[in-house]
Structures are given as C-alpha cells and as structure tokens.
Image: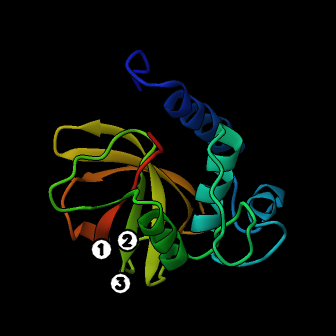
Amino acid sequence: IEESKLDELQKSIIRVSREEYAKKPISYDENVLTYSNGVREPWCADYVSWVMREAGSPLVNPNSGGWRIPGVLTLREYYKSKGRFKDAAGYTPKVGDVAIYVNTSSFNMSRQHTNIVLKVDGAKITTIGGNEYGRLRVITQELKPGVKGLVGYGVLPQ
C-alpha cells in the first residue's frame, strides 16, 4: 500500500490493520474477544470499531455512548447521523473508509457486513474485514454498488 499520499489517520488505520492481520485472529480467540469487549457475537463491526479507536478516530455508539458499535445497521446509522455516509453509487472510496454491505451472505452467512478499505485501484478495492468466514481477511473485489450487497461507505472525519 502506497502511503506517501495518505494523511496521518489513514496511515494509522493501515498500521493497526497490519498489526492485527499479523496476529491471524479467528473466532473467538483472545484477539477477537478484545475487539468485542469479551462478547461472543458476529464481530465484523466490532473489528471496525476497535480499529478506528486504536487508530485515533473512535466511534461513539448512539445507544451506549461507548466506543464499540457491534451492529452493522447501527454503524450505518451512526455514519448517517454524522453526515459521513456516502452511497456506493457515485462515490469512490478512500483508504480508511468503512464499506457497508446489507442483505448479503457473501462474507459470513449474515445479512449485514462491514470492512475497511485499504486500497483503491481503478475498479477494484482491497479491504480488511473481521469475521469473514470466522477470521480476519484481506480481499480484493470489484468496486461496484450492489456487489456483495455493497450499499455505501462510512467516511473518515474531515
């Protein structure tokens, strides 16, 4: 990942993601339980929340006030309430954006999913996501609205 044009928050998200990927977390090892505050649950949004906190841009759960937003739909509503949700149609994501998928079974047999954009390369994005088939996974996929249920992105604060 070329970091020379990234801001400090984006670089921090990449650094935290690399460190966590090296640990090879799987459901429900000590790393995953750290992301979820010890709760055994689908952990994709927990991972996103944890990375954002560790990278210096913590989220705020609208229900509890805590740093962890464990539900994908609540995560999407959080970004919408902050004016930081971009519909997938017509938006080109940036490093550090949070991709949000709804009505999908592509990643982990759930109806919602989320992961973090690490790289944008033409018509493809590379993401890192927790609980993708029970593990932390990096994948490259088409950058198209609707692919794998992609509905939009939570964007970093300006």
> Which amino acid lies under the numbered mark 1 shown in the image of this protein?
Gly
Disc 2: CA contacts within 10 A as few (<14), some (14-19) or many (>=20): many
Q: Is residue 144 something one can see in this rendering?
A: yes
Q: If the image is split into quadrants, where does the N terminus sit?
A: top left
- Residue beneath label 2, please? 101
Up/down of 11 relative to 93, above or below: above
Q: Is residue 108 something one can see in this rendering?
A: no
Q: Are marks 2 and 3 in contact (CB under 8 Å)?
A: yes
Disc 1: CA contacts within 10 A as few (<14), some (14-19) or many (>=20): some
- Residue beneath label 3, please? 103
The quadrant where residue 17 appears: top right
Residue drawn where x is 47% and y is 61% of the image: 82
Label at residue 149: 1
Q: Are marks 1 and 3 in contact (CB under 8 Å)?
A: yes
Label 1: state its secondary structure.
Answer: helix
Cα distance between the residues tagged 1 and 3 = 6 Å
Disc 3: CA contacts within 10 A as few (<14), some (14-19) or many (>=20): some
Residue drawn where x is 84% and y is 58% of the image: 30
Up/down of 58 relative to 65, above or below: above
x%, y% of residue 37?
82, 66
> Which amino acid lies under the numbered mark 2 shown in the image of this protein?
Tyr
x%, y% of residue 124?
23, 46
